[in-house]
Amino acid sequence: MSAAAIPVLTYHGYNVAGNDYADNDHVALARDLAWLGAHGWTVVPLGRAVRSLFDGADAALPEKAICLTFDDGTDLDWIDVEFGELGHQRGLYGILEDFQRRDPQRAAPHATAFVIACPHARARMATAALQHGHGMAEQWWALAERSELMSIGNHSWDHRHPLVVSAEAGGGNFFSVDDLAQAKRQVVESGHYIAARTGAWPELFAYPWGQASDFLRFEFFPTRVSEHGVRAAFGTEPGPMHAGSDRWYLPRYVCGEHWRDPAGLAAVLK
Ligand SMILES: [Zn+2]
């Protein structure tokens, strides 16, 4: 991978089905950080990488730069939890902290956590889909944003999640966000909600399920920058991002989908 190609890795804090790499994104992240460190990769903030690639700012990225993202904003991104029979689970943030503590000389690892704005949607999703009573609180967003290790990104107003939006109204399908009113709700209204809690406008957006309608990708994002204030939007097509990528549909590698073990990670980063 050349210096100007930057891979972006994605983890889901709620992926805890066992205590092995293959079925636990916390185990995978801890192992991957160690592997990346041992193989000369430097984790850089996603916002910094975007500014470097697309806005010509801060050109001095490390040669092997890589970015981390966490999707959906469950509490497991931030805090340690007890997970029934599977026991104590270190939060993803704590895993970043542990990694830095082990070698304070190295650049702090950083992740962008893409969160869902609507409190009603989060409550529904947490109640119906998360195990062991864990939630999707917003109280940690400001702490994360102020921390050295994490930023908060925008993962839409309600994810068009089928628990929240009926199928007739486009639930279960983010491609259905294909007109101006819906785009404003999913990107701008959510941005205001998140910014009111973190104190910072979320400049990075991740499409739910990686689904980008043509309207969002080719019309709304490119032509209404002053309205949405977003610098880049991310899907889940595998591949590294580079200066020639579409900044409104940037690729990411998803743990468990595009790689499942350390050898798989090594292969996608070749
Ligand atoms: Zn999502």
Image (cartoon, helix red, strand yellow):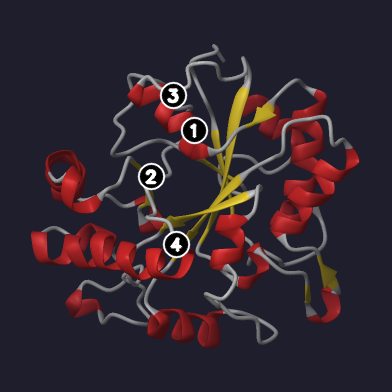
> In which quarter of the view is residue 180 placed?
bottom left
Q: Nearer the viewer, mark 1 or mark 4?
A: 4
Give the distance between the C-alpha atoms of the residues marked 1 and 3, in whole angstroms.
Answer: 6 Å
What amino acid does circle 1 point to? Arg
Determine whether label 2 and label 1 are within 8 Å by CB: no
Name the front one of labels 2 and 3. Answer: 3
Q: Which residue is mark 1?
A: 48
The secondary element bearing badge 3 is classed as helix
What residue is pinned by disc 2? 235
Q: Which residue is mark 3?
A: 52
In which of the image's four quarters is ligand 1 placed?
bottom left
Give the mark nearer the N terminus: 1 vs 4: 1
Left of 248 or right of it: where is 139?
right
Query: Which residue is tagged 4?
Result: 199
Q: Is residue 269 visible?
A: no
Q: Position of residue 240 (x, y in %)?
A: 48, 27
